[in-house]
Amino acid sequence: MTETVTSGGPPDQNPAESTTPGLAPETFAPAQAPSPEQPSEEVEFVQLLTPEGERVEHPDYSFDLDDDAIKGFYRDMVMVRRIDTEATALQRQGELGIWASLLGQEAAQIGSGRALNERDMVFPTYREHGVAWCQGVDPLNLLGLFRGVDQGAWDPRDNNFHLYTIVIGAQTLHATGYAMGQQRDGVIGDPENGEATIAYFGDGASSQGDVNEAFIYASVFNAPVVFFCQNNQWAISEPIDRQTRIPLYQRAAGFGFPGVRVDGNDVLATYAVTQAALRRAREGSGPTLVEAYTYRMGAHTTSDDPTKYRLTEELEHWKLKDPIERVKAYLIRTGASDNDFFDSVEQEADGIAANLRQGCLSMPDPELTEMFDRVYVEQTPQLVQQKQDFAAYAASFSVGAEGSH
Amino acid sequence: MTKISLGKGINLGLRRAMENDPKVLVMGEDIGKLGGVFRVTDGLQKDFGEDRVIDTPLAESGIVGTAVGLALRGYRPVCEIQFDGFVFPAYDQIINQVAKMHFRSMGKLRMPIVIRIPFGGGIGAVEHHSESPEALFAHVAGLKVVSCGDPVDAYWMIQQAIASDDPVIFFEPKRRYHEKAELDETAETAPAPLHQAAVRREGTDATLFCYGPMVKTCLQAAEAALEDGHSLEVVDLRTISPLDLPTIFASVKKTRRAVVVHEAPLSLGPAAELAARVTEECFYHLEAPVLRVAGFDTPYPPSRVEEEYLPDLDRVLDGVDKVMGY
């Protein structure tokens, strides 16, 4: 399936033409930033649900679940968008130091997250709130990092969802190593009941050495890992063509494994493509790179100001491809859902948001004295001493303390 | 008793750790059929297979980054970095990921990873093959840093490092790989805990603190100092982070003078930390300031002049003369 993309993507051009030595210097100028005014480029990706909410077929990928599953995806996406909206509001009100919004990437995250089985392992970036939702991580736990009360409060083993990783790309190597462990544990070989690992990262991280090393390790060891790249077109202020001159999914070929681009705003296609990649990993056929072609509709984080580097028209264009609206259009068109369903989902989302807000406001600040005990498994005498000294110093401020400050 | 080299001690220690725990993996560049460029892993792949003795692609961040994932899966990876100067591509993974994982996970996750680094100069190598970067790791919360100075320690300390649930940076004195000593392979327990210093030679006039390749140098210096009428104590620190402060303080309170010796550059090195600690704890016992004999604050020089750069017997004795002069 092809779709005309009028903005955001790199031109699918032959890079050799512009990098041949000996050409005039201006030939080496950076590619033009994407702009809605640019001529349309044909961008191929797997799509099963159009932005208008029409089901379409693809020769290689099909969506086998029923409308109840699609309603479930709709509910998931509404919930995580509501959680995201609430978290952004909490940041604006000073309750979070920062928030990394997933606005616009709901389908990429829910589609891929729902394709996981209960044994698959997830290595996220810091924006995978939707995948966390699919894995059953309490949304409140996600806020701790951004509120500054912890650096990851959930146990990754409870939900097979590793801690958020801030240094971009580092987690792709962790995922690859974890997958090498799955290989050694002998849990590979069955596409349904085997285990796989999925590593999330973005278009910006695709430039990192760690991501490229992860591709190499996964390839040569045939590790059961799915590299799930959400190409949201922007790495803070840098457009995708500052990261690559070819479509990202095509890089996989150079590493020796398949790459596929999916409409990341299409939850059905993302589900189907990710499931196929996971099955391939679980059965022992090795890694796959999935490029979910999507768009960061919000700022990079609440500290960012996208108006300084991109045009409103671009955002307006992508709003027409909204991942939630197209599912709603499908459910209405087919009569699979009525207004009661949509109302009930909205009500549930509001309830979750209210609970999230209440939970956030009542999060206690951590005690610095607790920090000394978890630097090492086997505590050092030096840290014991520092903890004691700090406790004594802190106590000297309390009322009635002898020689208090 | 068997006479073994320091390199063989590590080899035997790795072998024993792998025999005792099927979760122990060894990974690095050229460590399989070749047995590593220093042959430290010689024969391990033949006996334990390619899944446990992993020849990795030539990418150090990949070695440590995948070790993190393996550790999260329940394995105990031992990473070999081929030479000291090659560890830096992995520095981000070591500092940001390995060191902090236990802390940031509220103590839920553990990183039982050992990163073996042959370090130090004196082998006539080209650049990036002779460095002593231990301070760059010892400064980082969450890492433990040790160095073995003789074959028996090599055998036991590598096993203890592997058994540690904390990440350990394990510095191997590459120019001492061929030093030999008697090892009792039938012994069941290590002679000392991993994070404990050892008094290698008793003395009364001053203490030489050292580790890794400088242990032999300091022992030779102590022997030579007898001719000058100086009785020197030699303490092999063994653990750079955390330092074994009780052993250090006890020795200084006894001899009242201290010289700290390492190949690493002088400024902000491990000796500076040791000197500060001694000053804080042993101020009224000291007859002289704590002196440092170390590499210079230059990049490691071309090998034709490395003998001048490296602390040797004479420079150690010069330091001793200075502390005795107070």
Image: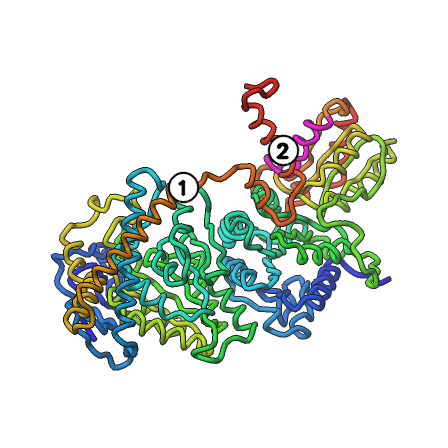
Whole-percent x, y for residue A180 in the image: 52, 69
Chain under numbered label 2: A
Answer with mark 1 or mark 2, whichever residue precedes in sequence.
1
The reply to whether the magenta stretch includes residue B274 is: yes
- Secondary structure that dominates the magenta span: helix
Secondary structure under the numbered disc 2 in the rendered image: helix
**Which residue lies under the disc numbered 1?**
A362
Secondary structure under the numbered disc 1 in the rendered image: loop
**Going by the image, does B101 lie left or right of A47?**
right
Chain under numbered label 1: A
**Which residue lies under the disc numbered 2?**
A388
Residue A35, by quadrant, is bottom left
Tell me what residue is drawn at x 54 percent, y 64 percent: B73
Whole-percent x, y for residue A149 in the image: 44, 42
Tag 2: residue type? Gln
Visible residue check, residue B162: yes
**Going by the image, does B172 lie left or right of B298?**
right
The reply to whether the magenta stretch includes residue A308 is: no
Q: Around disc 1, counting alpha carbons within 10 Å, would you say few (fewer than 14), some (14 to 19), or many (20 or more)? A: few
Q: Which residues are magenta?
A: B266-282
- Tag 1 and tag 2 share a subunit: yes
Tell me what residue is drawn at x 71 percent, y 46 percent: B195
Residue A55, by quadrant, is bottom left
Q: For this rendering, which residue is in front, B215 or A392? A: A392
Q: For this rendering, which residue is in front, B152 or A326? A: A326
Quarter of the C terminus of chain B within the rendering: top right
Tag 1: residue type? Ser
Residue A250, by quadrant, is bottom left
